[in-house]
Image: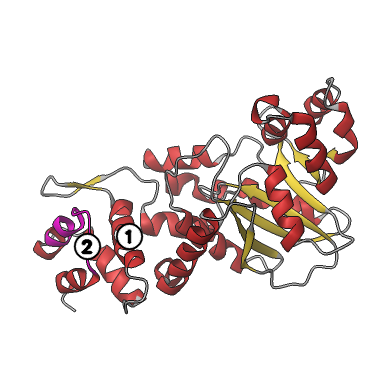
Amino acid sequence: MNSSIYDLPRLRAWHAHIAALAGMSTPEARVIVAPQTESHGDTAVIAGSFNPATNAHLSLCHGAFLQAHIDVVWLLLAIHTVDKEEITGASLEDRLCMLEMLAAAQPNVGIVLCNRGLYVEQAAALRSSLVPSGRELVFAVGYDKIQQILDPRYYTDRAASLDQLFALSRFLVADRGAHGAEDLASLLDQEGNRTYQRRIMALTTLPANHDPALSSTGVRAANAQGAGRAVGAQSVPGPVQSFIETTGVYAAPVTLPSGETIDRYEMRLKILKALFAEPESEFSPGEFRASVLLATSETDSGRALRRLLAQDSVSLRAIRRCIGL
């Protein structure tokens, strides 16, 4: 399974997709991984930053599958996420890596990349590229997200934007934190929200083990405190936990016996930066893995590679020399 983590051709391809979508002036979406099963129903989507994907996201998937007319769920990673504009934690490429590892174990789950964070723009992009004619677009979200969607501060013309959004899509809303179906009903009964009530429903088909308090933020915090493995099985799917443990993506920096402090995941990102800067160069997944392992080792070669990676620009030829190839 860990071979996916060093699958350089895929990582480079995703990097190219991200760069291309970021430069587009209109809402656009691209399929990254198609579901292994063909859909004959409505198009269900769970959008998020997936930093990382958690068991709560899987609960939303399974809850959506139990809805009538839904047999496939797409996980949508947005290049820009509302209220999370700065990319921290896992890189977008690595979030796609985790999602792909997750989708490999879920044949009716696909992955799509979008260049917009607002749901109305995502809906427009998906409608033009992913939703078959005559089918509905259905977003499965947590209560906090529907609150955000209905919040006037995100819109210049709220009525026009929401009219467009709910013409293009409908929403299934899961419990989140202490907020459940009663809170949703109260929210939808507020003036300005009643117009959209028929397009927003409580997601009542969640699995019994759904944890409304589970969050990606909590997973990152647990890993930073060294408790990631202890909470892993309860918090994240197995493939995601494998990625987290292998890369140290959310872990605190480690101190080597020599006293030097290094960030394991930062070493991976610096090597990836060099790999992305030379997209046509030959550099195998095995060399990528060897480079990361060396950059986190307490050896003379490891220290030399870390000094090299501290530079603004690093060639793959120089990295190869450090790993002895």
Q: Quadrant of the C terminus?
A: bottom left
In the picture, measured across the screen, residue 62 lies left or right of residue 90, that is right
Q: In this view, does 241 lie above or below 7?
A: above
Q: Position of residue 10 (x, y in %)?
A: 47, 71
- What residue does disc 2 label? 314
- The amino acid pointed to by label 1 is Lys
Q: What stretch is highlighted in magenta?
A: 304-315
Within 10 Å of the Cα at label 2, are there few (<14), some (14-19), or many (20+) other Cα atoms?
some
In the picture, measured across the screen, residue 83 lies left or right of residue 173, that is left
Q: Residue at coordinates 61% horizontally, 64% vertically from top-left? A: 103
Q: Residue at coordinates 79% horizontally, 30% vertically from top-left? A: 159
Residue 99 visible, this orientation? yes
In the picture, measured across the screen, residue 233 lies left or right of residue 12, that is right
* Distance Cα–Cα, label 2 vs label 1: 9 Å
Q: Element type at marker 1?
A: helix
Q: Residue at coordinates 19% horizontally, 53% vertically from top-left? A: 310
- What residue does disc 1 label? 273
Front-most of residues 311 and 186: 311
- The amino acid pointed to by label 2 is Val
Within 10 Å of the Cα at label 1, are there few (<14), some (14-19), or many (20+) other Cα atoms?
some
Front-most of residues 195 and 33: 195
Could you tell me if the residues under marks 2 and 1 are in contact, i.e. CB atoms within 8 Å? yes
